Image (spheres, grey):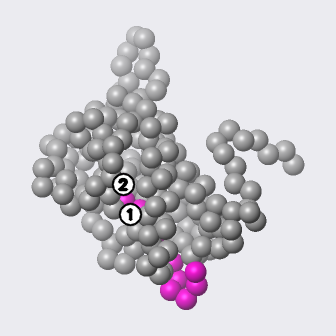
Amino acid sequence: MHASEILDLRALVEDAVRQALPSCGIPIGEPFDPDDAFDTLDTTEQLVAFMGFTGPVLRGTLALVAPLDIMRGSYPLLLKDRACSVFDVFDWTGEVANHLLAKAKSNLASRGVTIEASTPRVMLAQQPRVTRSVQGTICSTCFASGYSWIKVWFDAIAPDDQPVFGSSLAEHVVLSAGDAVIF
């Protein structure tokens, strides 16, 4: 993958984060390097959601790391008689990761790149450290959110001998969330 393609992919991922997280009730600030954040890691419980993706040219993993409290606070279905359980928040975190990868997928499709996503996996961790892959890290960044931050990793690999980006948007129909297609 060429350096210019890596920069373009990073911009697509950061744009997906800016679209997806606020639409899920998670306010975010400007991105910053996660290495700076690790010097002052929270001791709060964190939820880690992973999703794999694959396509003809690009494959990899998206990881979302967020404090349990932020994810619980953004949970959209608080019931009158009870607070949401940890399992509800796990499901919600997986859905947020799914929404984030869907936005990235849409952004990629606008550049001629198709991918298919796996099912999200979510786990609870304390002071998680996500190790960057040596070759494939496209986007490894944090976004301020409330008193803490949300971490996003997007690792991807592509063959060196072919371009990642295909034809222009004009040749592809990209649907928005909620669009209906009738055959």
Task: Look at the numbered disc 2 and give the secondary structure of its residue.
Answer: strand
Give above or below for 75 relative to 135: above
Which residue was labeled with disc 1? 139
Choose top left, top right, bottom left or bottom right for residue 107. bottom right
**What type is the residue that disc 1 sits on?**
Cys
Q: Residue at x 69, y 54 (%)?
A: 174
> Total label count?
2
Dot 1 or dot 2, earlier in sequence: 1
10 w.r.t. 27: above or below: below
Segment colored magenta: 151-163
Residue 179's disc number: none
Give residue 153's quadrant in the image.
bottom left
Tell me how far mark 1 sits from mark 2, CA to CA: 7 Å
Depicted 15 relative to depicted 78: above or below: below
Q: Quick check: is 118 in the magenta stretch?
A: no
Residue 119 position in % (x across, y down)? 52, 52
* Residue 130 appears left or right of 22: left
- The residue shown at (56%, 51%) is 102
Nearer to the camera, 169 or 134? 169
Identity of the residue furthest to the bottom in this view: 161
Report if residue 118 is visible in the image.
no
Element type at marker 1? strand
Near mark 1 (Cα within 10 A), the count class, few <14, some 14-19 or many ≥20, is: many
In contact (CB < 8 Å): disc 1 and disc 2: yes
Q: Which residue position is annotated with label 2?
A: 152
